Amino acid sequence: MAEGNAKALIPILVFVVLYLGLGILLEYGLHVEMGFYSIPVLFIFIIALAIAFKQTKGPDYNEKFSIMSRGAGDSNVFMMILIFLCAGVFTGVMNRSGAESVANFVLTCIPIEYAVIVIFLVAAFVSLSMGTSCGTITVLTPIAVSIASTTNYGIPLCVAAVIGGAMFGDNLSFISDTTIAACNGQGCDMKDKFRENLKFAIPAALLTIVVLFIMTLAASGSSGEIGDFDLVLIIPYLVVLIGGIIGINVFIVLAAGIVTGVVIMVGTGTTDALDVLPMIGSGMSGMLETAMVAILVSAICALIAYNGGFEALLAWIRKRFHGTRGGMIGTGLLVSAMDVATANNTVAIVMANPIAKDISKEYGLSPKRTASILDTFSCIMQGIIPYGAQMLLAISAVAAMGFTVTAFDIIPYLMYQFILLFVVLAYILFSKKEPVAEAE
């Protein structure tokens, strides 16, 4: 295996240029709606894989496939894919009804001066329970727009509160694909990563609440129309959330959530029994591209590692970052750059995982801390970039209600993301070196 070969990183560069270049062209040059998400990302990864395959000198044709297979067939990758599919089943079974019930119940019980704060908190809870920021934004943005339209808060502030809360939950949820990717890639338990994340996610959320309170002191008007709710529909989310927090195996937690969800959704008449199977299929289908991305990225990374690409990147990081804090900063910058390039925090984590694992060994970081840094920095960037799915979905939902906002109207109000970045950097700056036993 090569000692260090920067040219082995070319497949990643090709992916970045093709994906980011085509995305900018479609989104801003040709004004294609959701332009970044009309690009066949799997095809771009196939091109990157072909280049990595071609670059690999020495092994014969069959041995190259063996290298890729060992990467794609890693036990962590296989477990990650199974969890993705199970999480998709849960999301498909519950669809939007449970999240809408959570949101509508809370929003009917609050004074208007606390509306934006509660929008943030509801988005945080729903995303934490559902494990998807995009689903949360899709459900809650219309409600946020409704509230904004009858108060003096403004649509950008209310929508930014939804996006911020959604990214809080996406970062922490046990069934979020980012959590799954980070934990399995680094080989740590989800509950350990969750507890590590709380050290800066909770302070950031509390500071965000304070800032939102100050910003909305001069509230006036009455809330918009809020829909009906059924508290029974919240139970499956609580089952998943509580089960994950206390450390029950993720497959058992998801199975319990799925069974509870099916029983309640059918028993309450929210879903017809005959619709359950199509909903399960739809939920799993929604995770298939993510699963295939995990496989292709793992194969690409195996070839890049064989060719010495990651060793070259590690050498670059070693020259510029030193000590435990330097390792965390290097990991954060790495995954942030990947996210800016791909506009997908899960893909960014999967691509960064092998290098981050080497960094953690080099600098004595525990798997839980590395997984936490990966997830947090990727969610910060994903919640800010104007061409990310979260921002584009929010803008589309606002437009569907007859209003117009741009990403650059919303970005200045993304308080949680900016505060989280400040808090996590402060955490890194003042963090203590981990015990050697914990870091191994």
Image: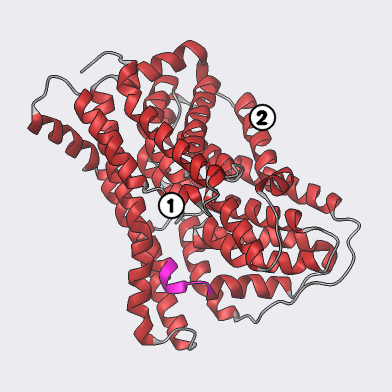
Q: Position of residue 60 (x, y in %)?
A: 8, 26
The answer to whether 200 appears left or right of 300 in the picture is right
Image quadrant in which you'd find residue 439 = top left
Residue at the location (59% across, 67% down)? 139
Q: Position of residue 126 (x, y in %)?
A: 58, 63
Q: Determine whether label 2 and label 1 are within 8 Å by CB.
A: no
Secondary structure state at the residue bearing disc 2: helix
The relative height of residue 268 versus residue 170 in the rendered view (above or below) is below
The relative height of residue 44 versus residue 143 in the rendered view (above or below) is above
Q: Amino acid at mark 1?
A: Ser
Q: Position of residue 58 (x, y in %)?
A: 12, 19
Colour style of the rendered protein structure? secondary structure
Residue at the location (76% across, 59% down)? 116
How far is the residue under mark 2 from the one under mark 1? 38 Å
Q: Which mark is residue 426?
A: 2
Q: Which mark is residue 38?
A: 1
Magenta stretch, main secondary structure, is helix
In reply to whether residue 95 is colored magenta, the answer given is yes
From the image, which quarter does the C terminus lie in?
A: top left
> Magenta region: which residues?
91-96
Question: For the view shown, which residue lies furthest in the top direction?
Answer: 319
From the image, which quarter does the N terminus lie in?
A: top left
Q: Residues within 10 Å of mark 2 (few under 14, many from 20)?
A: few
In reply to whether residue 228 is colored magenta, the answer given is no
Residue at the location (78% across, 64% down)? 148
Image quadrant in which you'd find residue 402 = bottom right
Secondary structure state at the residue bearing disc 1: helix
Mark 2, mark 1: which one is toward the viewer?
A: 1
Tell me which numbered mark, 2 or 1, is placed earlier along the sequence.
1
Q: Residues within 10 Å of mark 1 (few under 14, many from 20)?
A: few
Q: Position of residue 372 (x, y in %)?
A: 50, 39
Q: Amino acid at mark 2?
A: Ala
